Amino acid sequence: MPTPAAAAAAPAKAPVTTPKIAISPEQVWRDLVAWVQAHGAEILIALAVGLVIYLGLSLARSLVARLKDRPGERLGFRALVGRAASKTNQLFLIMVSARLVGGYANPPAPVAETIAFLFTIVAVFQAAVWIREVVLGLIERRTALERHSETLANATGIIRLLVTVVIFAVAVIVVLDNVGVNVTALVAGLGIGGIAIGLAAQGIFSDLFAALSIIFDKPFSVGETITYDKSTATVEKIGLKSTRLRAVTGERKIVSNANLLQKEITSYHTLDHRRLKFAIGVIYQTDPALADRIPQILREIVEAEGGTFVRSGFINFGASALEFEVEYDVFRPDWEEIYAIRHRIGLAILRRFKAEGLEFAYPTQTSFTAAPDGRLIMPYSDHLPTDPSLRD
């Protein structure tokens, strides 16, 4: 038995390795020739069946693709299926057929592995094309009624680019993973790179996604008059980074999309009517019976001039007037028409009140004077001194 010192001094044995057997092209060719000679009939049957499958798949693709051209369904779900089917590649149909009949003739391992490898690559990228078409079709369906072609065209181009890059990047990772490549480091690198790019372009992406939100969610559209903060303006253009508005006072305002969406926005586009009111004051000397008729008089005026009467009545004893109020609706979408109707109603009130003998009140103040004994002196001329020398 060797001593520990002798064992330590003995050289270490080299690990036993299994030699790799290299397959030469000549060997592959000989295997193929032998396979064809041994399974000639099965190969011919597999080719015939594969051709039938390919023709059947091609016919099915053509029938389904017609759905996208049906009238009235250009943006329907059937049209989306037809649109995706029309993007089916011929190579994918060939590989599906080969995959289905590949095992019938018991092909050699290199042939079977090649068919499986090519089928995996083609199928993954074909699925990416289908998903891309469906996603873009849904986006177009969502924006079908959008009238702002310039903004939508710019946004659609960016959306197409982003969708294409993301989907095909995932497809490449799936293919690499299926062929045995370790994609963990690649995915981690892409994630870190995406985070870095996102942080560097945070402001740009914020405005971009805000623009997409405006286009898809439609809080307002070009041509609408909106109020945000304390400003009222008409939307002139919705860009990818900012929105341009024209204030009612004439100035052009440019607001970033992200900043605009953070504010409370009031849109007058869907407003089918506006409620207006007039506050009216008449003098205290008005006859109560005549004052009692004022609400009915105002109602007749409003209805005669195209407004919809809501309510009217006495509201307050003011400092210088008996205060009344009239509220009415104007069912017009155009502010110019509403403005004109309000003008006509105001002048009609002025004319009718004058005809009825109703006097509008205005701020007044009456001064009373008293004699030394406390008696009111009114008017002054009755109590002036008779001696002219005392009048001065």
Image (cartoon, grey):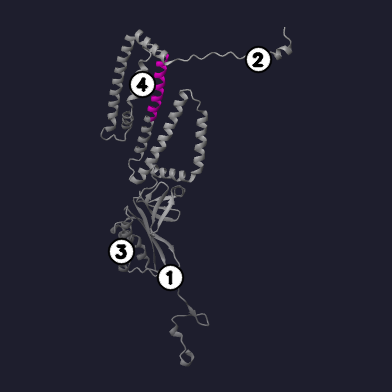
Taking the magenta stretch, the answer to whether it contains residue 198 is no
Front: mark 4 or 3: 4
Which circle's residue, 2 or 3, is located before the other in the chain?
A: 2
Q: Secondary structure at mark 4?
A: helix
Q: Which mark is residue 95?
A: 4
Nearer the observer, 256 or 390: 256
| In the depicted structure, whether residue 92 falls above or below residue 19 | below
Residue numbers of the magenta segment: 109-128
Q: Is residue 148 visible?
A: no
Q: Which mark is residue 348?
A: 3
Res. 16 image quadrant? top right
Residue at x 42% of width, y 14% of height: 109
Q: Is residue 261 left or right of residue 69?
A: right
Residue marked by disc 1 = 363
Percent x, y of residue 9: 70, 14
Q: Secondary structure at mark 1?
A: loop
Front: mark 2 or 3: 2
Mark 2 closeness class: few <14, some 14–19, many ≥20 residues within 10 Å: few
Front: mark 4 or 1: 4
Q: CA distance from mark 2 to mark 4?
A: 53 Å
Q: Amino acid at mark 3?
A: Ala
